[in-house]
Amino acid sequence: MIIDILTLFPESFSYLNSSILKRAQESEILKINVLDIREFSKDKHKKCDDYPFGGGAGMLMTAQPICDAVKSVQKENSHILFPSPTGKTLTVERARELSKEEHLIFICGHYEGIDQRVIDLLKPEEISIGDYVLTGGELPTMVIVDCISRFIEGVITEESLSEESFSCGGLEYPQYTRPQIFEGLEVPKVLVSGNHAEVDKWRREEALKRTKESRPDLIKDNN
Ligand code: ADE
């Protein structure tokens, strides 16, 4: 998959070049390009923002640099995304679907937002990461890219995906590693018993207990 990220703050994206996503890019499963929208501005001072018509707080990103940046990378198979609190909230199901796309283009808004004509012309999928407002689309883009990338074949193991929170509808069970006793707290005996059936049963029970406590809304039959 190729991901092109269009932003006024390219330096924010170094996180995507570390750890698991770094490995995915090294093995050419994934290619992430970050483009500076400012370079596409036709303004002599490379200005990319202006006051909103009708007045109001703050500045808006102008349409021209964004549209030209998109045109520079858009192909027939491109899917354009615009992270925004007004979009539909990202779900595991949508992330899985998006992981099948060949080319994603992310438009990162900043300041008070972007000129509506970018949306009207390019018709991006507006997507939210939750009911709160952040200062720009950079962090949401990283969250969405990270979430989608994990579902691309070869990025992480199928086993990790199948056992994690939300994959089976609920939350994941607690996990422990060495040492067996830390600060007086012992690893649950069943996990070192060698009895796989008992381990599986304990994990199912703990996962359900956690889900009931933290996210009862995820349990279909809420009893
Ligand atoms: N931009 C600002 N806030 C956002 C949010 N909650 N989700 C996606 N993009 C955003």
Image (cartoon, rainbow, N blue to C red):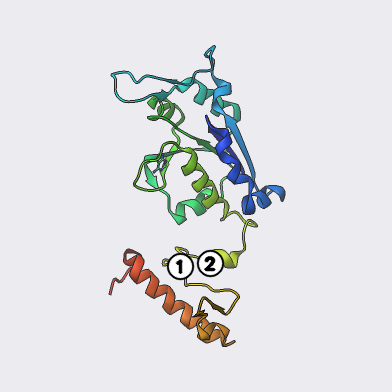
Q: How many C-alpha atoms fall within 10 Å of the one at disc 1: few (<14), some, or many (≥20)?
A: few
Quarter containing the N terminus: top right
Front in this rendered view, residue 139 or 103 = 139
Classify 77 as above or below 46.
below
**Residue 161, position as x, y percentages in the image:** 55, 63
Q: How many marks?
A: 2
Q: Residue at x 42, y 79 (%)?
A: 205
Q: Which residue: 29% across, 71% down?
A: 222
Examine the rendered structure and indicate whether residue 54 appears above or below residue 222: above
Residue 172, percent across and down? 47, 69
Is the C-beta separation of discs 1 and 2 under 8 Å? yes
Quarter of the rendered image showing ligand 1: top left
Residue located farthest toward the top when viewing the structure as drawn: 44
For mark 1, what is the residue?
Answer: 168
Query: Disc 2 marks which residue?
Result: 162
Q: Residue at x 35, y 66 (%)?
A: 214
> Residue 93's spot in the image, x, y percent?
46, 55
Instruction: Please tell me whether residue 175 is drawn above or below residue 57 in the rendered image.
Output: below
Residue 166 can be seen in this image: yes
Residue 53: quarter of image:
top left
Disc 2 residue type (three-letter): Ser
Task: Point out residue 197 in the picture as x, y percentages from the top left corner.
Answer: 53, 86
Q: Residue furthest right?
A: 27
Q: Secondary structure at mark 1?
A: loop
Local secondary structure at mark 2: helix
User: Given the image, on which type of amino acid does mark 1 rest?
Assistant: Cys
